[in-house]
Image (cartoon, helix red, strand yellow):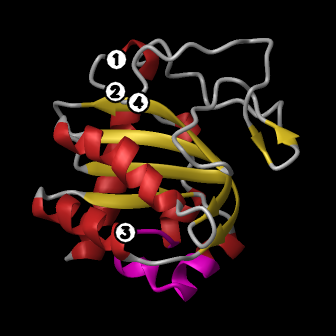
Amino acid sequence: MHAIEPYFNWRHLYTAEEDVRSPFHGTEHSEFEFTHAVYDHALHPQWEAFGSSTLYLKVLFADYDEGFVIMEFIGEWNDLLHNDIMYLKRDVIEPMFAEGINKFILIGENVLNFHAGEEDYFAEWFEEAMDADGWIALINFLPHVREDLQAADLDQYLIFGGKLDEMPWRALEPDELLARVDSLAHKRLS
């Protein structure tokens, strides 16, 4: 896992470390020291810690005028034991929401497992996003992870499946990705 870097081809457009409105503003990353791990697997130092011991993320792009963010995840999403959604919601999503973000694109190709806990934080996040004409979309999560999300009835809060499961997001610019996801999200929500 140490060789899996967050997507970097948009760094000329946006870096969370330099964004004063980002929860990760001022974060410094070593290129040589591996300080994060999922269990006994070291992670590339560019991933961001946000309170979870098994799930990490990278804010790839944020546009406050358009109100959207693209985040890539790696690790195990474990709400049952570690309440990862609480840390994500309180420490990442709420500060972004306060800055005008209401559309959340979560990329999960590297989320290895999902363990459900309570759905309260998902419900709260969904209601806040919907009240602001937004949504929460999951892109390219692994099939077994999507099945676990559905089994926990979280598909009532999160948009995933269909074309979102095979989205060629790396071939798009952030605004193009937003347009595609927004179109699919509006079809699902209406």
The residue that label 1 is drawn on is 19
Q: Which residues are magenta?
A: 147-161
- What distance separates the C-alpha of mark 1 from that of mark 3? 26 Å
Count of residue discs: 4
Image location of residue 29, percent across then percent down: 62, 15
The residue that label 2 is drawn on is 22
SS for callout 2: loop
Kind of residue indicated by mark 3: Phe
Image location of residue 106, percent across then percent down: 47, 51
Q: Is residue 181 left or right of residue 58?
A: left
Instruction: Tell me if residue 151 is in the magenta stretch.
Output: yes
Residue 32 falls in which quadrant of the image?
A: top right
Mark 4: few/some/many CA within 10 Å (<14, 14-19, 20+): many
Kind of residue indicated by mark 4: Phe
- Is label 3 or label 4 in front? 3
Q: Is residue 131 left or right of residue 32?
A: left
Disc nearer the start of the sequence (1/3): 1
Disc nearer the start of the sequence (3/4): 4
